[in-house]
Amino acid sequence: MGGGYVGLVTGACLASCGHRVTIIDPDQEKVTSINRKEPPIFEGGLTDILQKYGGKTLFASTSCESISSADLIFICVGTPQGEDGSADLTFIREAATQAGGAIRESEQFQVVVVKSTVPPGTMKDLVIPAVLSVSGKKEGEIGFAMNPEFLREGRAIYDFLHPDRIVIGTDGDEAYQALEALYESFDVPKIKTSLTAAEMIKYTSNAFLATKISFSNEIGNICKSLGLDVYEVMAAVGLDPRIGSLFLNAGAGFGGSCFPKDVLALVHMAESAGVDPLILKAVLCVNDHQPDRMIGLLQKRIGNLAGKQIAVLGLAFKDNTDDIRESRAIPVIRALFRAGATISAYDPMAMEAMSRLFPDVQYCLSAASALTGVDGALIMTEWPEFGKLKEEFSLMKTQVVIDGRHMITGPGIEGVCW
Ligand code: NAD
């Protein structure tokens, strides 16, 4: 249930592992696109899987009919940020209710598995009661599992097929065995745990990774003010196995559909439980600050931004995806417009999505075209092609570039933290 980034990738990968999969999504356009073997999202390797298994063992539908005969029902719907910062569980509630309705008449033992990121207690307090009450079944007649997903957009197929570990929180042995059998060919540690611990493991992982990024950004800000290169510093720091070298890249901060909303939801959970999450609040604060820092550095170099023409290179929240959710380019574009600048932008994949949010940006077909005649430029996404830009900067009116992703060096180019 859910044909978005997680549901579609999960479905496609399980089909490629030899299972028969139906992806259920109320979005007719997505369903039609999947059945046409054309992924509605960009994810490397996805087209090949759809071409190979689509119409054979991989199907999509807006109807919940196929649920009644499924061994496992994966709920992969969105859990967006609610108005107060907590996770909005509306889609989870709907999906659990629909799943319960669809398995009413079924006589086989089925397992309802949640892959969406949900706050600790959601399985026990929401999913299980909803499925049981609508299906009319008793505890033990259906299995329940929490199987969080750790894939990264842009590398989702690889990550799903090569996980570091598989976390399986269940309400009993039968449900655990069903998941263990499903993942039999994955030779990685399988963590058998409770439903609630599995829910917490996902939030904790995301919060820790976000913390590493904000920590690195803070160190980067300090290094820059001391005239030091944070990348040189972190390269040595990361060799300590207690620290590790990943996620120490200072820059414009984290975006995407997970880190910002999950850290905020954890802050909300902590506060509701009477705990003041000092570190997590600081993680978000540093992250919010980084785009402002980029604007500040630009102003320092070219002065008042009113009437200036600025190029924004990179709109997706990271490379290899067309996803702009919580992209750091969004606050930067807002701040530039607020300051009275006009904006030209280029991204190899995310311009269509961003044009729905900011129709007044001038979208260009190449980095060179976006840079032509501008007073300054900001690099917001780590697209490898930006690392190869050189002569293109000479097309600028004044060569002032603030690099938010440690992509380039050269005259007039300065990093946000280096
Ligand atoms: P998404 O918004 O891309 O997709 C959600 C899909 O669910 C949409 O296509 C929507 O139409 C569909 N949907 C809504 N209600 C439905 C219903 N009742 N039945 C069937 N489908 C329904 O979201 P996503 O990025 O795939 O994220 C899904 C969950 O996985 C979230 O909880 C997210 O936090 C978590 N997660 C996301 C990622 C990621 O990188 N995107 C990684 C790990 C975990």
Image (tube, rainbow, N blue to C red):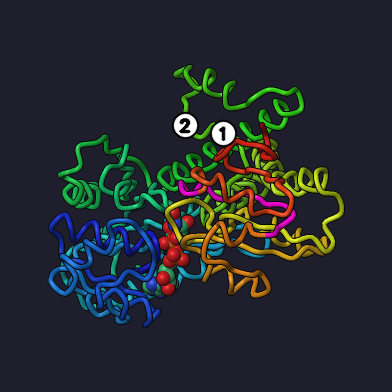
Is the CB of the residue bearing disc 2 within 8 angstroms of ligand 1?
A: no
Q: Which image quadrant is residue 414 in?
A: top right
Q: Which image quadrant is residue 336 in?
A: bottom right
Which residue is under mark 1?
212
Element class at badge 1: helix
Q: Residue at x 22, y 76 (%)?
A: 66
Q: Is residue 124 visible?
A: no
- Front-most of residues 228 and 148: 228
Q: Which residues are magenta?
A: 373-385
Q: Which mark is residue 246?
A: 2
Q: Relative to 8, is 205 above or below? A: above
Which amino acid, mark 2?
Leu
On the image, the x and y values in percent for residue 132 come to: 35, 68
Q: Is residue 359 visible?
A: yes
Which amino acid, mark 1?
Lys
Is the CB of the residue bearing disc 1 within 8 angstroms of ligand 1?
A: no
Left or right: where 32 falls relative to 53: right
Q: Nearer the viewer, mark 1 or mark 2?
A: 2
Q: Are marks 1 and 2 in contact (CB under 8 Å)?
A: yes
